[in-house]
Amino acid sequence: MTDADGDLAARVRSVLETDPEEFRRRAEADAETVKAELRDGTFDNHQSIIGLEYEFYAVSEGRWREGGGANAEAARTAAAEVNAPHLSRVPRRLLELIGFEKELGLHNAEMTTSPQPLNAAGVRAQSAEVRARLEAAEETTGAEGMRLVSDAMWTVSPVGETAREYLSDSVDDDGVRIATNMSDAVRYHAMANGPGSESFSIDAPHVELAADTVMPEALITSIQPHYQVASAEDIPRYHNLALRIAGPLLALGVNAPFFPPDLYAADATAEDVLADGWHENRVAVFESVLNEEDAQKVTFPADLDSVEEAVDRVAADPTIVPMPVAEGNRFDDAFATLRRKHGTFWRWVRPVFDGATRSAANARIEFRPIPAQPTVGDSIAFLAAFAGLLESLPRRRHPVSDLSWETARDNFYAAVRDGVDADLSWVTTDGVETSDREALFDDLLSHAEAGLADAGLPEAEAESYLAPLRWRAETGLTPAAWKRRRVRGRVDAGADLADAIPAMQRTYVERQRETLFDGTLADWIDG
């Protein structure tokens, strides 16, 4: 036990002593403050604005990089098990140097881009900022013998540790449970010490893991496009449309078909995992670890009828940890308790009311289903598609808004299970409901392109941003499908999952190193 652990435990105890009823009352009062500001037009903007949250995990780099030569591929294959890119903890000083933020696990790093207007220059600026900051991060982390990886789920644990050990290791500090490999985020540690939080487990095919903290959630990483609406009262329309496009966009983006091998049940064979495993296990991890029987925190949310309802939902959301809030002079400090509560309002699509100053106040939709992607081009494609669709569909009164909520929800979980091969339902421009994949994705991406054109992007530029997603729709190949192909090939050659998954992961990181800034998933396909 270190002094830092002791200080963290003390802060957790302070949180646990917070009066939950007083916290609830303050959140409800804050909700009324926000609704009053909404009526005054404080959260309105004169234009749509976009942004992006982008999460990574770190791996040790130096020990597995190898030279070229005619036999390089054979050497890499033979050394796959030994030289797989192992998960690596990121020193906090290093995060500060590269300007990234800490996330749940000590191996995580997060980038948040600067909000930009949705126009040609704004989309270019988003792409340029991601590239610039990643290039700087690569230089700094490379000097430390590690690399940030854009991927939905890590599968190779730190050297000398199993994934089960890394995710479940914790210490007890006078009755307070502290996860050994979790960042010093008090709210996460406090969740493991509140009422009814004795165990956190993953519910996914053939996976067995239970821990006494929320650390299993640190398996996963994502990208989260943001879309600030011009008029806050339109939040329900954008929110409900985002629910309709969630399934199809996730189907194109799935990237988490495998867990670390030691998390599978002892009697699960490679054939079992390949036959029954889902294409996007990130959703399973997030929902099963953070949901409780009486507190469904991570869900596919219901439609919204009004902007006031969006605020009230946050205020009424079950409080797992009543975090105390310090007083401040920022604009959003006037509703600081509600803002704090929103930090555990985990919905796959969620409205946000935010702003450090009155002039910066905004109402936005955060789109949370998409896992981290193989390259920057793939990631920006999803930001562009999401923004283009929210720009286009309301403007054109697209009839997909009439798709039932139940169908939209079923689309989402079908995409979780089967990716781009899922049985999805869509309503095309002419009002015809279809499950034809070609018709669905053509309509979806054509409207995304039209929305970007409406925002001022030249046609060729709009097409180029969306090209990675059109390629996936046309070929039926996603990052998850690529991973499954690699593992299937190794299994068919006689390997077990303990060999096949690290070999796949190693190739994933190598391909990403070669194509991160100047390629897409399409460049990873052999032959």
Image (tube, rainbow, N blue to C red):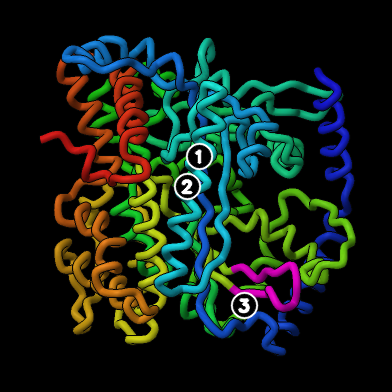
Which residue is outermost to the left? 527
Number of other residues with Cα within 10 Å of mark 1, as a class: few under 14, some 14 to 19, many 20 or more: many
Q: Which residue is mark 3?
A: 309
**In the picture provided, is 137 more to the left or to the right than 371?**
right
Q: Which label is found at residue 137? A: none
Q: Nearer the viewer, mark 2 or mark 1?
A: 1
Q: How far from the left and from the top, in percent, is residue 249?
A: 33, 59
Callout 2: helix, strand or loop? loop
Callout 3: helix, strand or loop? helix
Q: Amino acid at mark 3?
A: Glu
Q: Which residues are magenta?
A: 352-363
Residue at left 30%, top 20%? 503
**In the picture provided, is 128 more to the left or to the right than 173?**
left
Residue 405 in sight in this render: no
Q: Which residue is mark 2?
A: 222
Q: Which residue is mark 1?
A: 56
Chain-order first, disc 3 or disc 2: 2
Whether 423 is among the magenta residues is no
